[in-house]
Amino acid sequence: MEHPMIKTLIAATTMAAVVYAVAPAQAAHRHHMGVGCSGANFGKTEAAVEAMADNEVKFAAEKEVSLAQDAMLNNKWGECGAHLGKAAEASMAK
């Protein structure tokens, strides 16, 4: 018969292994600003960029959105999040 502490230790070790394996993949989907490469974030960012006045900042933000879409289509999640984050930052600039 196994000791309850051994079962707990095995369960904790298994959980740690799963978290260790999954965390880097999920981290790649996020930018340092917390903008993940998702449809919802694309929608919000694109709407914010569209609402901007036509100027160089808006054109740069539109390019970042385009680069993010290209990166997403090529499964480059970290790059996608970085470009989307830059576009979001630009849309918040005054």
Image: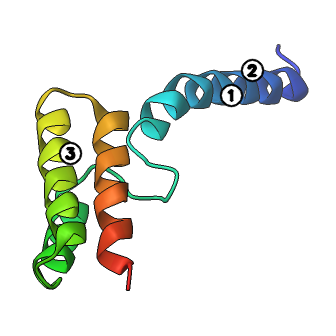
Q: Amino acid at mark 2?
A: Ile
Give me the C-alpha separation between circle 2 and circle 1. 10 Å
**Label 1 packing within 10 angstroms: few (<14), some (14-19), many (20+):** few
The part of the image, by quadrant, that contains residue 91 is: bottom left
Give me the C-alpha separation between circle 2 and circle 3. 41 Å
**Identity of the residue drawn at 25% across and 63% down:** 41
What number is the disc on residue 68?
3
The kind of secondary structure element at disc 2 is: helix
Q: Quadrant of the N terminus?
A: top right
The reply to whether discs 1 and 3 touch (Cβ–Cβ < 8 Å) is: no
**Identity of the residue drawn at 25% across and 69% down:** 57
State the residue in front, 22 or 59: 59
**Identity of the residue drawn at 38% across and 79% down:** 93
The kind of secondary structure element at disc 3 is: helix
What number is the disc on residue 16?
1
Q: Amino acid at mark 1?
A: Ala
**Identity of the residue drawn at 43% across and 35% down:** 28
Q: Is residue 29 left or right of residue 4?
A: left
What number is the disc on residue 10?
2
The part of the image, by quadrant, that contains residue 12 is: top right
What number is the disc on residue 83?
none
Q: Is residue 50 above or below residue 10?
A: below
